[in-house]
Every structure is written in C-alpha cells, then in structure tokens.
Image (cartoon, rainbow, N blue to C red):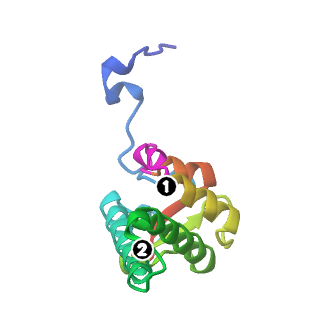
Amino acid sequence: MSRTFSSWLSGPESAGPSHPDNAPGQGLGLPSSGPGSLAPMGRRMAALALDWMVGYGLAGLGVAAGLVTPEYLATVVLGVWLVLGVASVRLFGFTPGQYACGLRVVPVDGPGLGVGIVRAAVRGLLIALVVPALFADADGRGLQDRATATAVVRSR
C-alpha cells in the first residue's frame, strides 16, 4: 500500500482526493445549495453592516434624547448591537440584518432546537472581539460558529 506524504508547500491538491460534490456544510448535514445551506460570506458581511446601522440608529436616538454623550457613542453602539443581536438570535434565530439578507442562525448539533441564550451571548461576544470572525474553517464558518456549534444558513 502506497502512501503519499506531502506538506503545506505542496498545495491544496496534496491534502487528498478532491470531491466536487462535497459542498461546504454537507459534513454538518446541511444541503449544498438553496434554503438551509451555508450562507456565503458576502451576505453575512452585508447583514453585519445592516445590524451596525441599526445599532447606530438606536444609539443616535439616545444622543438626540440627551441620554448618551457623543464621547461614548461607539461604546453605546457596540452595547446596543450586542444586546439586539443576542436577543433577536435567541428569540427569532436571526438579527434584523440577517433577516433582510435572508439568513438564519441554526444549531448544528441538534435539529429543531433553537439557539439558546448562552450560545447567542457567547457568539455575540466573540463576534464583538472581531478576531474569531476573521478565521474560518473549510466550510466557511467562523470560529464563533464553531465554538457555539452554530451555522449561519440561507433562509430563502
């Protein structure tokens, strides 16, 4: 029996036989395309930008009402974004930006279960740290999704 030895210098082809039918998310039991498939990074980034805009809008109302000073605006925006994200993912399975982009957060370790408050809070805190969201696995899931056993999928 022959065995091929390779290193990272050999490129991705050396990692083993490629399977074109093995789409991202299939190892998690998700379909390869359509509703329920892993969301592309572009949609996820658009949803995050929309959520930030909602956070800025709500924090801006606090500034206009005199409840927040402009020096603390960035901190208040982060807090509003985090609370809104955790509450909406827990209650509905998506944030306002994800809803607008046709996305949903689902647990990958149990079908039919919703995302609990602890998972939603840990996931939100990790995204707020930014660094975990910059690293993705082979399926395109960020470290925040791997740590909380969740995935962002298409809802439509």
Left or right of 4, for residue 148 = right
Up/down of 111 relative to 96, above or below: above
Q: Is 24 placed left or right of 50 in the picture?
A: right
Let me know if residue 44 is in the magenta part. Answer: no
Q: How many marks?
A: 2
Which residue is nearer to you in this view: 51 or 13?
51
Q: Main secondary structure of the magenta part?
A: loop
Distance of label 1 from label 2 (alpha carbons): 15 Å
Q: Which mark is residue 55?
A: 2
- The furthest residue to the bottom: 65
Do we see residue 29 in this rendering? Answer: no
**Residue 97, percent across and down?**
40, 75
Residue marked by disc 1: 127
Residue 77 location, x and y as percent? 44, 68
Query: Split into 4 quadrants, where in the image is the C terminus?
Result: bottom left
Horizontal side of 115 relative to 7 (left or right) equals right
- Position of residue 59 relative to residue 148, above or below, is below
Q: Residue at x 57, y 80 (%)?
A: 92
